[in-house]
Image (cartoon, rainbow, N blue to C red):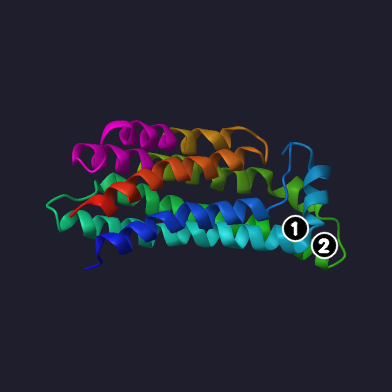
Amino acid sequence: MRGNRSVSLMLVAFPILLALGIVLIPVVADYSDHSLAVRAVGQTWRWFLGHVVAALAFGYSVWVVSALDEHLRSRGYRLHSMTLIGLVFGAALYAAGLGADGVGPVALLTAGRDPSGFFDGSGLWVTSLFVAATVLYGLGLISMVVTLNNAGVLHRSARWIAFVGALLFACAPAILSGWALYGVAAAAFMVFIPIASMVARQG
């Protein structure tokens, strides 16, 4: 079984990895303006690597939550099934959406074709993936925070910071701008850092 410090470091690493991926992705200020997205794709390696790193972060989060659940079980608690279902399937859909959005336009650009064709034709498909991912992952985060509050893992202001962070994570993607991703990154820190801090303090 992992020690408190190990679980705490794993919890801290997720928002850092996610933030790195988000910062790498060139900002598309308005998703409805495909010319801005095409310009962003022109920064090929930043676009591609940012999406890959962000996708890896969501996959990694499943491992993190599994370690947290193992930690809680050793203390007589466990995460609710809604947490695990929401985070696992939400992370999978995020990874699928990020993979499509990261590879599709870059592949067209590399082939000498206009990347705008990807954005014109994939809007419904990719957007649906991200919406479903946000709903599932957001519900999973909210369920996790509520469970941790009930288990007494979070105390005082940490309870509210984590809960507000979970709500922000679920709501921020509704803003149709690349700047909303920075809200997602901030929300991940708000959720996972208080949890990591409290886990590290447990004897």
Q: Which residue is mark 2?
A: 109
Residue type at numbered disc 2: Leu
In the image: residue 98, left or right of residue 32: left
Q: Position of residue 186 (x, y in %)?
A: 52, 41
Taking 16 as reference, is 172 above or below it?
Answer: above
- Please name the residue shown 46% across and 61% down the image: 59
Q: Position of residue 164 (x, y in %)?
A: 41, 31
Tell me the quadrant of the picture where the N terminus can be found: bottom left
Residue type at numbered disc 1: Pro
Secondary structure under the numbered disc 2 in the rendered image? helix
Q: Which residue is mark 1?
A: 105
Span of residues in magenta? 141-166
Is residue 136 visible from the viewing direction of this image? no
Q: Position of residue 78 (x, y in %)?
A: 19, 51
Q: CA distance from mark 1 to mark 2?
A: 6 Å
> Is residue 92 part of the magenta span, yes or no?
no
Around disc 1, counting alpha carbons within 10 Å, would you say few (fewer than 14), some (14 to 19), or many (20 or more)?
Answer: many
- Please name the residue shown 54% across and 45% down the image: 185
